[in-house]
Image: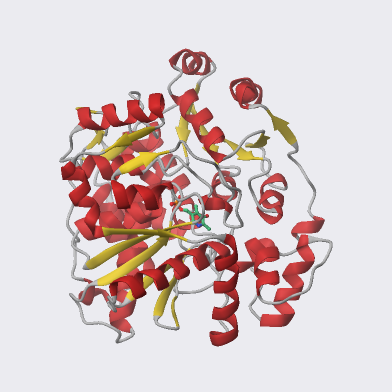
């Protein structure tokens, strides 16, 4: 049976269902599998399989306390017509790279890949564990997680979902998606501050046992829909395996050939899922970690020093405007040989000194990673040139990834086949994309969507249509110090 342990103390072992319900460990650490399982098949054997089949194989391995029927139920309900393409995740070639399009779900960003299934995994886990308390999902978002979590959990019985987003840190369209969310159990607040403030606030609440005790008296228990929840991470492994299988199917590679992956990175969840895929046996060469001006990860990969004593930039790839990448803790844990004492120490340093330096062992593990960054102007230029030369439309985050890939190519001359994680529809960041491809300025951000459509003929995702005329339901802006009290009010 698979066991999960905290990155900060590996004494307690719990099952997958328990780890999903808890979200984060009581000691502040993140749950990781005690041992990473091996792929249950050779990728080459799966070229006839659809996305759901691959998902069942992998998710079933990690959550082996679920029955086969339970996993099947979760997967089939998650990856259905909500996705606007049959393949769920198309792999599209543009120039020399293969774009793994992860944004064909309801909210048009890759967060749908995991958040379409998390509510099913969670409610199934609650049934298994005979959990009779209401689960309150606390979510900090840099823009995309919030909406995907709201869509996933809206009206799911036994749950309440509360989302905090940085008032000035998301695109107009992202904000509109969240504040128009329907559903009796949905609650959305903007906070004065940036994403790190929102995420730290949520983590603080998870560590506030007194507050949780008060909630328990009202029959409520907290859990998380952020990628700190292992139930978010595991479903993300699937698409790397599926992407690899697609390349075999398209005749690009033979089974066993190494591919590189490029991931536009914020909280380090997506790229960590690729790392897990490799540990499971998927032939991956380099992990190319792409950042915007908030390049704390680039510096970390190059020096082994994680240092957040630096300016914070608001960019046009807001889902990566993050300085504290939570899931890095999981990578460090694995690279340290499961040394929870070392990880606790590093995380204490981060809290106290806002920096830490990792051991030589961890540094040598980082050699599988290449880190680089790009700025707003280069991002826009990358969108433009890709569109003009190849008629392929990228969003700002994907463009950061593609630009960093160009840098990697010229530095390394490594021409291995490469998968780019394409994390959002261009329409979510319509203003930046429109201006990049030469569309003239307009007053209203929503007009950019129509203009991009007439220029490119790329379909506007269903979930983004008519957003401007939808009724605003959530409009409160709060200070981070008031997060506890609004949670309490929401659960009344
Ligand atoms: C969340 C997000 C990212 C960053 O992913 P992490 O898993 O947090 O590293 C990148 N691009 C988009 C569009 C996102 O929504």
**Residue at point 28%, 80% (across, down):** 248
Residue 394 sits in quarter: bottom right
Q: Is residue 260 left or right of residue 116?
A: left
Residue 457 sits in quarter: bottom right
Quarter of the picture containing the C terminus is top right
Quarter of the picture containing the N terminus is top left
**Residue at point 44%, 38% (across, down):** 308
Q: Position of residue 255 (x, y in %)?
A: 20, 77
Between 336 and 138, the residue placed more toward the observer is 336
Between 208 and 307, the residue placed more toward the observer is 307
Vertical side of 27 occupied by 339: above or below: below
Q: Is residue 51 left or right of residue 167?
A: left
Q: Residue furthest right?
A: 443
Q: How many marks?
A: 0
Q: Position of residue 401 (x, y in %)?
A: 45, 65
Q: Position of residue 430 (x, y in %)?
A: 68, 65
Q: Position of residue 364 (x, y in %)?
A: 18, 50
What kind of colouring is applied to the model shown?
A: secondary structure
Q: Is residue 492 visible?
A: no
Q: Is residue 179 visible?
A: yes
Residue 356 sits in quarter: top left
Between 252 and 311, the residue placed more toward the observer is 311
**Residue at point 26%, 42% (across, down):** 332
**Residue at point 43%, 16% (across, down):** 209
Vertical side of 369 occupied by 35: above or below: above
Vertical side of 275 occupied by 448: above or below: below
């Amino acid at each position: 049976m698979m066991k999960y342990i905290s990155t900060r103390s590996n004494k307690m072992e719990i099952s997958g269902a328990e780890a999903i319900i808890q979200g984060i460990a009581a000691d502040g650490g993140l749950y990781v599998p005690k041992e990473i399982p091996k792929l249950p098949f050779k990728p080459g054997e799966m070229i006839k399989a659809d996305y759901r089949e691959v998902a069942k194989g992998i998710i079933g391995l990690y959550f082996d306390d679920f029955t086969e029927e339970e996993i099947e139920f979760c997967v089939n309900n998650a990856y259905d017509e909500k996705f606007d393409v049959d393949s769920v995740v198309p792999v599209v070639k543009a120039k020399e790279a293969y774009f793994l399009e992860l944004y064909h779900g309801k909210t048009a960003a890759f967060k749908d890949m995991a958040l379409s299934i998390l509510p099913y995994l969670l409610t199934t886990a609650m049934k298994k564990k005979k959990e009779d308390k209401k689960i309150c999902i606390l979510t900090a978002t840099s823009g995309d997680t919030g909406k995907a979590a709201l869509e996933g959990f809206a009206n799911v019985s036994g749950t309440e979902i509360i989302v905090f987003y940085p008032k000035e840190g998301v695109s107009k369209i992202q904000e509109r998606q969240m504040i128009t969310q329907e559903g009796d159990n949905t609650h959305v607040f903007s906070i004065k501050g940036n994403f790190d403030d929102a995420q730290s606030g949520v983590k603080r609440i998870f560590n506030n046992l007194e507050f949780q005790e008060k909630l328990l008296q009202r029959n409520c228990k907290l859990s998380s829909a952020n990628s700190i929840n292992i139930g978010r991470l595991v479903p993300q492994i699937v698409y790397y395996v599926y992407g690899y299988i697609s390349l075999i199917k398209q005749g690009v590679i033979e089974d066993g050939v190494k591919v590189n992956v490029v991931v536009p990175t914020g909280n380090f969840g997506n790229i960590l899922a690729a790392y897990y895929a490799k540990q499971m046996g998927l032939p991956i060469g380099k992990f190319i970690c792409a950042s915007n001006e908030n390049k704390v990860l680039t510096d970390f990969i190059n020096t082994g020093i994680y240092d957040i004593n630096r300016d914070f930039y608001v960019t046009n790839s807001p889902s990566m405007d993050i300085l504290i990448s939570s899931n890095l803790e999981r990578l460090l844990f694995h690279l340290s040989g499961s040394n929870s004492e070392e990880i606790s120490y590093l995380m204490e340093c981060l809290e106290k000194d806002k920096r830490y330096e990792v051991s030589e062992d961890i540094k040598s593990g980082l050699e599988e990673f290449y880190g680089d960054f790009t700025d707003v102007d280069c991002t826009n230029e990358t969108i433009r040139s890709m569109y003009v030369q190849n008629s392929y439309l990228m969003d700002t985050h994907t463009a950061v990834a593609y630009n960093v890939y160009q840098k990697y190519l010229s530095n390394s001359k490594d021409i291995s086949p490469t998968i780019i994680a394409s994390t959002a529809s261009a329409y979510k960041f319509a203003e930046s994309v429109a201006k990049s491809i030469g569309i003239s300025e307009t007053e209203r951000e929503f007009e950019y969507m129509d203009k991009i459509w007439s220029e490119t003929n790329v379909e506007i995702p269903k979930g983004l249509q008519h957003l401007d005329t939808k009724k605003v339901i959530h409009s409160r802006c709060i200070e981070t110090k008031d997060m506890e009290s609004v949670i309490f009010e929401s659960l009344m």
